[in-house]
Amino acid sequence: MKTKVKTALLTMALAASVEASFAQVNTADSVMSHAGGRKFSIGGYGEVAMSRNFYSDNIYRYSNAKQYKHDPSHGRFDIPHVCIYMGYDFGKGWTMGSEIEFEHTGTGSANEQEFEEAGEWEQEVEKGGEVELEQFWLQKSFGRWANIRIGHIVVPVGLNNAHHEPLNFFTVYRPEGENAILPSTWHDTGISFWGRKGDFRYEVQFLAGLDAMNFNRDGWVNSGAGSSFEFKVANKYGFAARIDNYSVKGLRLGLSGYYGKAMHNSYPHDLEGDLYDKNGNFTGEKKRYDGVKGTVAIGSFDFTFNRFNWIVRGNADYGYVGDAATISDIKQNRTSNKAPYQKTPVGKNAVAVGIEAGYDVFSQIGKMRAENKKMYVFGRYEYYDSYIPESGQQRYDFTDKRRMAVGLNYYPLPQIAVKAEYSRRLLKSQYNDEPSVSIGIAYEGFFL
């Protein structure tokens, strides 16, 4: 009898763990979602990835595609992300959450070949993007419906930012489309008001603005949230908002967006100004680019369906940058070559649309189902373009990409996924397609 009771309890615990592992929890909440009355909690996630790319990695593969069509394949081993969560409940509604992220095994010196500078080799000490404090905030909760969070927070615009842990997507690497055009993971310092009411979760954020001087052709605004300084410049500000609905069992529908000014959010503030003459005397004139605002507006819809042994996820994102041609001219022609800015032009618009679906074939095998093991056979399709120019800007058709992927996700335990996929990046006819094979393993969970 005791054995049966223990088995039943273990089964219930595993089932609860599976449900928690696949829960549609916003990333910004995941640090504290497990707390359950504990004062201190620790957890995290990590990924190991290995890939073989059957296309050229030469920097001129787009400008002279025929020459590099038969180049040899190349492989990569990588540790994309390892993150550690730590949270503490002080009591009386006060909590702390933090997330430290190590990207690509940590920090140090690195050799890089700059695609934007004719393949020039550079050696530099990596800073942003290698070891980051992705979250650090203090929160006061007045009730389930009202929480104020102040500090460094995740900006939940788009599916990938709101749900970026590795068990929230089937592919070995994060989905390319949103990863190409938006900061990922987007995190910034500011104030957030969020809560839950009925079947809705809502959030509004006030943040430091993006930096237009770091916008570029191949990533649109995805470098705009970072800073090469020891501080984040905040001459301009931004606002983000998100709302999710859970009315239908197993279905989450989300809308999110961002609005803010991005020009004049660099250091020093008087970029290319006319306030002083060549002798350093104050002229009293307006700055040359005072009228350039660099307005950024982003809208996104995403959903997750998790029921009947299916998981289906999708996103659609569209963005706008005002004064794109002027910003591009300033970056390319009117700033020092040694300035820490992205030199390629930025497009007026960017788009990313994606959908993936996976079916748990182990759900049809009694033994596997009883042991709570899962095997998802999945497919993914996405379209994205990081550079849609305004009138008069040069076109770069290789930024217009489609990608297909098929593969498997095996869950021996609810917190561990072994992934394998074949993918093919499809470009316009004048370029070569880019097929690859990837395998990876990932974990996600809480230890205390």
Image (spheres, grey):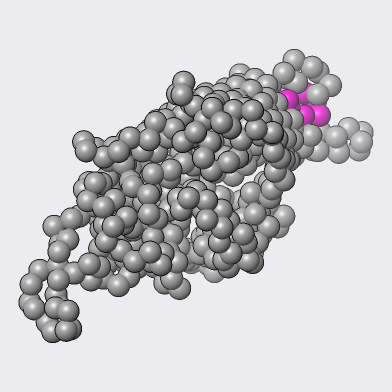
Quarter of the image holding residue 56?
A: top right
Q: Residue furthest left?
A: 284
Q: Is residue 86 visible?
A: no
Quick one: which residue is furthest to the front in this view?
A: 67
Q: Residue at x 52, y 56 (%)?
A: 120
Q: Is residue 78 left or right of 433 when viewed as pictured?
A: right
Number of numbered markers = 0
Residue 331 on image: x %, y %: 31, 57
Using the image, determine if residue 89 lies above or below residue 303.
below
Q: Quadrant of the C terminus?
A: bottom right
The N terminus lies in quadrant: top right
Q: Which residues are magenta?
A: 369-376
What residue sits 81% from the left and 38% below the top? 10
The x and y percentages for residue 78 are 69, 48
Q: Quadrant of residue 82?
A: bottom right
Q: Which residue appears at 18% of the width and 69% of the height?
A: 273
Closest to the observer, 121 or 380:
121
- Horizontal and vertical percent for residue 69? 59, 28
Residue 316 can be seen in this image? yes
Q: Residue furthest top?
A: 364
At which x and y percent is residue 348?
A: 27, 40
Rendered position, 260 above or below 23 = below
Magenta stretch: includes residue 226: no
Q: Residue 362 occupies which quadrant of the picture?
A: top right
Residue found 49% across the figure and 42% down from its top: 179
Question: Is residue 70 found left or right of 329 in the rendered image?
Answer: right
| Above or below, comparing residue 227 to residue 36 in the picture | below
Give the left or right position of residue 28, taking residue 375 as reference: left
